[in-house]
């Protein structure tokens, strides 16, 4: 590798964010070298990425996957397995992109920061669930957390003009924008009839199925409120959600003098991905060009909190703190999986999360072992509610 090139580990390389990251890397081969990847079940896709980028290390879920992948790749590649494998690769590169789905991304978040690497974070579930543990490893020398989630990437850019004092005292509030999802404006009766096909039809973004369903319930925005509090050390009472159907303003920061800074671009995740890789440099691309010489409408409206109770649940989890956000996210993973498997209706998703939260017992979340216990307990209660 040329000394000026930065090594990149892309975990979750076969998903929506993974594939878009590969696209950025294809255009940036002079700056970055992809050295390590992982994927869930998509072994032939992993083999194709190894061949195209000449990747040195791959993490897979099981020894069985290792054997199959080994047969698909006819060259010398190190194949590591399971959570340990993921953690190992997360400590192996200058920049670690966490594009894994759900709580399974936890070893990447903790591994990269613990090893003093730049973590380019798409996987919000790990940060939401493990916020107190992430706070501990974030201070590791060299560790840097740069959000890929478009709203948080926008806020990261807006806050660059602010003195980075704890809690950002000159910030009045963060305004997270939300497209509103496919069900914006639907009545309670219409929502009762919402189908999987309806939920998977996002108006502005093309993403993996889980986050697309989360966008339809607004649980995605709820998780993003929690993500913002963890990333920026700002209390949830200073984080507001604004529906902005065009997905052009990716979020805003309101200062104590009433001034509001926003970041705008066309909705294309390659922009925040490129930002997280290139920082402090901006990479030159035209994925996000807006044409201000043409008439453009930007609308803003409050979210319908009655129709979308997920937002309220997330604020309540933020108020409770400790392991409550981990419970919210774990219960939601179980509920969304069940919805995608046609086992429950759309309206049952958030109802199941609410029923699970009723069993939460306050826990300050002070160790990894306790996080795993809480995650398992929440999933157990969520599955029990599924059976009732
Ligand atoms: P996806 O389902 O398209 O891809 C997920 C990736 O993780 C795949 O490579 C899959 O093989 C891997 N994976 C899934 N389960 C795994 C497991 N148990 N162990 C190891 N690997 C596993 O998801 P996505 O839409 O790319 O989202 C990835 C993350 O990025 C999520 O946390 C999501 O909230 C976040 N995010 C996505 C977008 C987007 O535009 N897609 C935007 C913002 C944030
Ligand atoms: Mg987002």
Image: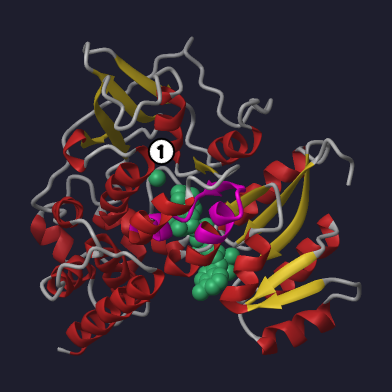
Tell me which segment is drawn in magenta. Answer: 110-128
Examine the structure image and report whether residue 119 is included in the region drawn in magenta. Answer: yes
Q: Is residue 385 above or below residue 161?
A: below
- Image coordinates for residue 280, horizontal then vertical, percent: 61, 27
Given residues 43 and 162, the one toward you in this image is 162
Question: Does 263 appear in magenta?
Answer: no
Q: Quadrant of the C terminus?
A: bottom left
Q: Nearer the viewer, residue 166 or 327?
A: 166
Question: Label 1 crowding class (10 Å Cα cut-off): few <14, some 14-19, many 20+?
Answer: many
Circle 1 residue: 152
For ligand 2, tell me if the residue under mark 1 lies within 8 Å. yes
* Residue 62 figure quarter: bottom right
- Picture coordinates of residue 217 (x, y %)? 25, 57
**Measuring 36% from the left and 37% from the top, which residue is drawn there?**
232
Image position of 131 with respect to 86: above or below: above
Ligand 2 lies in quarter: top left
Left/right placement of residue 346 relative to residue 6 reads left
Residue 83, horizontal then vertical, whole percent: 57, 75
Residue 276 appears in which quarter of the rendering? Answer: top right
Residue 171, compared with residue 202, is above or below; it is above
* Secondary structure found at label 1: helix
Is residue 244 something that shows in the picture? Answer: no
């Amino acid at each position: 590798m040329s000394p000026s090139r930065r090594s990149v580990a892309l975990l979750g390389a076969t998903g929506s964010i993974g594939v878009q990251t590969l696209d950025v890397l294809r255009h940036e081969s002079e700056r970055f070298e992809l050295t390590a990847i992982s994927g869930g079940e998509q072994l032939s896709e992993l083999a194709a990425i190894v061949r195209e980028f000449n990747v040195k290390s791959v993490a897979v879920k099981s020894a069985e996957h290792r054997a199959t992948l080994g047969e698909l790749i006819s060259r010398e590649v190190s194949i590591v397995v399971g959570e340990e494998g993921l953690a190992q690769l997360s400590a192996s590169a200058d920049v670690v992109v966490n594009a894994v789905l759900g709580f399974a991304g936890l070893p990447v978040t903790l591994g990269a920061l613990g090893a003093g690497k730049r973590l380019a974070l798409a996987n919000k579930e790990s940060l939401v669930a493990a916020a107190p543990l992430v706070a501990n490893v974030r201070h590791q020398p060299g560790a840097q957390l740069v959000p890929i989630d478009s709203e948080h990437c926008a806020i990261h850019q807006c806050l660059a003009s602010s003195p980075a004092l704890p809690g950002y005292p000159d910030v009045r509030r963060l305004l997270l924008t939300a497209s509103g999802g496919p069900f914006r404006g639907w009545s309670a009766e219409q929502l009762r009839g919402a189908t999987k096909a309806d939920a998977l039809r996002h108006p502005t973004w093309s993403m993996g199925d889980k986050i697309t369903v989360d966008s339809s319930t607004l649980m995605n925005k709820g998780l993003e409120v929690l993500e913002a509090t963890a990333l920026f050390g700002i209390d949830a009472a200073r984080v507001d959600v604004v529906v902005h159907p065009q997905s052009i303003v990716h979020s805003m920061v309101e200062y104590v003098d009433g001034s509001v800074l926003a970041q705008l671009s066309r909705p294309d995740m390659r922009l925040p991905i490129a930002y997280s890789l290139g920082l402090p440099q901006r990479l030159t691309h035209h994925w996000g060009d807006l044409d201000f010489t043409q008439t453009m409408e930007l609308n803003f409206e409050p979210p319908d909190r009655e129709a979308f109770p997920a937002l309220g649940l997330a604020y309540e989890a933020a108020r409770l703190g400790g392991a409550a956000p981990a419970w919210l996210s774990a219960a939601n993973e179980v509920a969304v999986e069940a919805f995608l498997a046609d086992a429950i209706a759309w309206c049952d998703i958030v109802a199941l999360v609410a029923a699970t939260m009723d069993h939460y017992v306050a826990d300050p979340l002070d160790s990894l072992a306790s996080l795993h216990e809480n995650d398992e307990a929440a999933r157990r209660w969520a599955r029990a509610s599924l059976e009732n």
